[in-house]
Amino acid sequence: RLEFIVDATQRVSYDPAVLQQDGWTIQKVDTPEEGEAFHIGRRIMWQRHEAIVIAFTPDETYGGLWKAAYVEDLETFDLEPGELQNAIKKWDNKQKQLNKKRTSVRVAPPSGSTRFSATANFTIDGIENGIILAVPTSKAAQGVLWPARVSHVVEGNLTASG
């Protein structure tokens, strides 16, 4: 029973009906000129964890508060305007780093030897037709398939059963 009570208490912190009753805006607006609810749905980084802004409420003291929820466990927290801007910057920086890693091509540093340079970009004609696998005759390696040769285009699509 205690688990159900804890789950219900946590759900109240991000339930849309409860948030609206408490005065939070949960409807995202299309442009920043329409209001601060523009940030609803935006991903942010807060305390080294990914979160999503789920609501906004005007506040006399801070100018506005945003409610966000961690993606991992849906635990909610409130952000002031400055904290939200920092969280958005952290998310944007993380995305830039991930994109940079994805687009960067790692090139092996040139070695002193050119012995294998001729085979660095080695391709096999007909590899798109598939590879014929063989079964070893050794009892120790039974069931382990190894590439025997490249199949010829006239062999068509062969399956493992033949």
Image (cartoon, grey):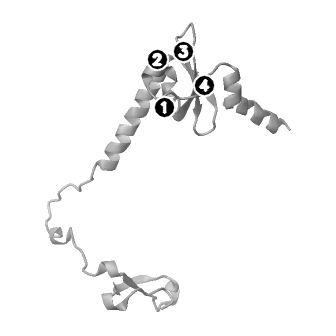
**Would you call the spot at circle 1 few (<14 residues within 10 Å), some (14-19), or many (20 or more)?**
many
Where does label 1 land, which residue? 44
First in residue order: circle 4 vs circle 3: 3
Q: Earlier in the sequence, mark 2 or mark 1?
A: 1
Q: Residue 115: where, in percent of width, then height?
A: 15, 70
Could you say whether the residue bearing mark 1 is in a helix, strand or loop? strand
The image quadrant that residue 117 belongs to is: bottom left
Q: Can I make out residue 136 in this image?
A: yes
Tell me how far mark 2 sits from mark 4, CA to CA. Answer: 15 Å
Q: Position of residue 123 (x, y in %)?
A: 24, 74
> Mark 4: which amino acid?
Phe
Q: What residue is shown at x 63% (from left), y 21% (from top)?
A: 24
Q: Foreground mark, 4 or 3?
A: 3
Q: Position of residue 125 (x, y in %)?
A: 24, 80
Q: Residues within 10 Å of mark 2 (few under 14, many from 20)?
A: few
Is label 2 in a helix, a strand or a loop? helix
* Mark 4 burial class by Cα count in 10 Å: few <14, some 14-19, many 20+: some
